[in-house]
Image: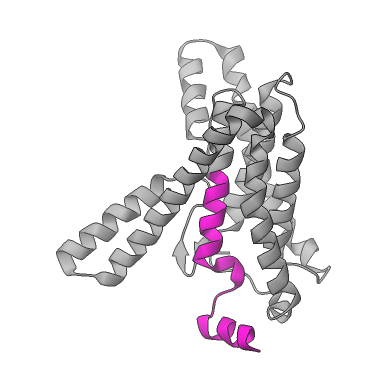
Amino acid sequence: MTLKLRHDSSGYLTCEHVSVFYLLMLTSGIMGAYTYVVRGGVFCNAQTANFLMLGISLGEGNFKHALFYFIPISAYVLGAIASEILPTPIKHYGLFRWDTWLVGFEALILFIIGFIPTTVPDPVVQVAVNFIASMQYNTFRQAEGIPMATTFCTNHIRQVGIGVAKLFRKHDQKGFHRGMEHLGMIVCFCVGAFLLSVFCKFMNEKSIWIALVPLLILFYRLAHADLTWEHDLLNKKPAGH
């Protein structure tokens, strides 16, 4: 009963809590560093670099190389499509929310990736990470009413600057606090990258398994909420959807 009252008073689902987004950002830092350090020197959490390389390749007349970039871009698009379509049929099972299923699926994919030797072409793993990163980005959109990206840092940096400016110009403590929450997201991302860089030295391709720690913590937390005090709210959409 205490947990239910806590949820009712906050007005937010468990999947919208800032602490959930911190763990997701930690996971993303691990994934981004993993594809860069272990799987081909690329960042798979976002697609800006791939579009840049696509344009550069086209400008250089290297059309065959340009076609390669459609692979990760397509995987990212498919991830967004899947995360839009799947929640509707999944909610009819009445067990977990889509957010919970996604975290479990993400953990499963990363677990499998740890068994793929580095002799396998890097794009195989890169595309898998593209796909799950896109689904995560599209599924977890707002943390307690604040728009948040969970796979890259660009907007977080901007929001930190905005928060500091609001403090100096208007003494806006609320705006500053919001900026510091974005700073917390950046810190979590960097911690994830740091941990991967340490563990990959002796775990190599299996170093991605350290991402399972925050993901399994998240899965337990979300599943527990779905089965208990939020069971009657399985059809409620998180803010931003």
Q: In the rendering, at what x and y percent does residue 131 appear?
A: 66, 41
Residue 71 position by quadrant: top right
* Dominant secondary structure of the residues highlighted in magenta in the image: helix
Name the residue rendered at 57%, 13% in the picture.
63
Residue 35 vs 236, above or below: the answer is: above
Name the residue rendered at 33%, 66% in the picture.
177
Name the residue rendered at 74%, 42% in the picture.
111
Is residue 44 visible in the rendered image? The answer is no
Residue 11 counted in the magenta span: yes
Q: How many marks?
A: 0
Name the residue rendered at 54%, 11% in the picture.
62
Which residue is situated farthest in the front direction here? 202
Which residue is situated farthest in the top direction here? 61
Q: In the rendering, at what x and y percent does residue 164 appear?
A: 24, 58
Q: In the rendering, at what x and y percent does residue 66 appear?
A: 57, 19
Q: Quadrant of the C terminus?
A: bottom right
Residue 102 counted in the magenta span: no
Q: In the rendering, at what x and y percent does residue 31 appear?
A: 59, 39
Residue 168 vs 69, above or below: the answer is: below
Which residue is situated farthest in the left direction here? 169
Highlighted range, magenta: 1-28
Residue 154 position by quadrant: top left
